Amino acid sequence: MNVEYINPFIEASQSVLKSVANMDITLGKLHIKTSPYASDTLAIIIGLTGKLRGQVIFSMSKEIACQIASAMMMGMPVNELDEISKSAVTEATNMILGNTATILYNRGIPIDITPPSLLIGDNMQISTNKMKTVCVPLKLSSGGTIDLDIAVME
């Protein structure tokens, strides 16, 4: 997979999480995931169409999702994922992909994104047929990691 496709996802993730949740991100070691692979307890999947096709999956623990939702709601304590906190964390990922789409469009790579789907469960397995999945670990300044799994093809 071309690195020019990966960097916009990283740029947008850093920008959005800083602006909506005041969280700084450092990158872990990028690696390829072999399908099927295990996911954390919460996964948000957003599809891509256009010049790039595939999906982006944000995997995180419920605790990380609660941290992000709390930060987005001006520090209001979030101890469990109710409908409002699920909506907040899903919207953060939607904003990341919206920003990514804008960055890619400005670089001559037009894409559209699908509405996000939120999955919660234990022992989830994710399979990306016929596509390599590049995992970008996003290490949050507040502690914890979000796995940004990118599976796209031209």
Image: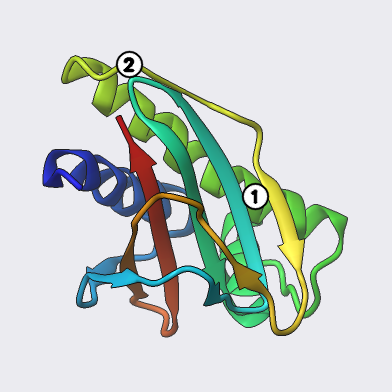
Q: Residue furthest right?
A: 83
Residue on which disc 1 sits = 90
| Screen quadrant of the C terminus | top left
Say whether marks 1 and 2 touch (CB < 8 Å).
no
Please state which amino acid type lies under the numbered disc 1: Thr
Residue 86's place in the image compared with 124, above or below, is above
Please say whether residue 75 is visible from this viewpoint: no
Whole-percent x, y for residue 117 in the image: 70, 47
Give the residue at x 50% y 38%. 95
Quarter of the image for residue 99 reads top left
Please indicate whether residue 112 sits to the left or right of residue 78 in the image: left
- Dot 2 falls on a residue whose secondary structure is loop
* Left or right of residue 16: residue 104: left
- Left or right, 37 with reference to 150: right
Task: Please count the marks in the image.
Answer: 2
**Where does residue 2 sit, x and y in percent of width and height?**
15, 43
Residue at (60%, 30%) from the top-left corner? Answer: 114
- Residue 103 lies, in percent from the top left, at 26, 27
Which residue sits at x=49%, y=44%? 55
Q: Looking at numbered disc 2 in the image, what kind of residue is underneath it?
A: Pro
Q: List x then y, in percent, for residue 35.
A: 47, 68
Q: Which residue is mark 2?
A: 110
Q: Secondary structure at mark 1?
A: helix
User: Front-most of 35 and 111?
Assistant: 35
Image: 30 above or below 5: below
Decide which of 46, 13 is in the foreground and name it. Answer: 46
Residue 9 drawn above or below residue 139: above
Residue 96, image quadrant: top left
Q: Residue at x 22, y 39 (%)?
A: 5
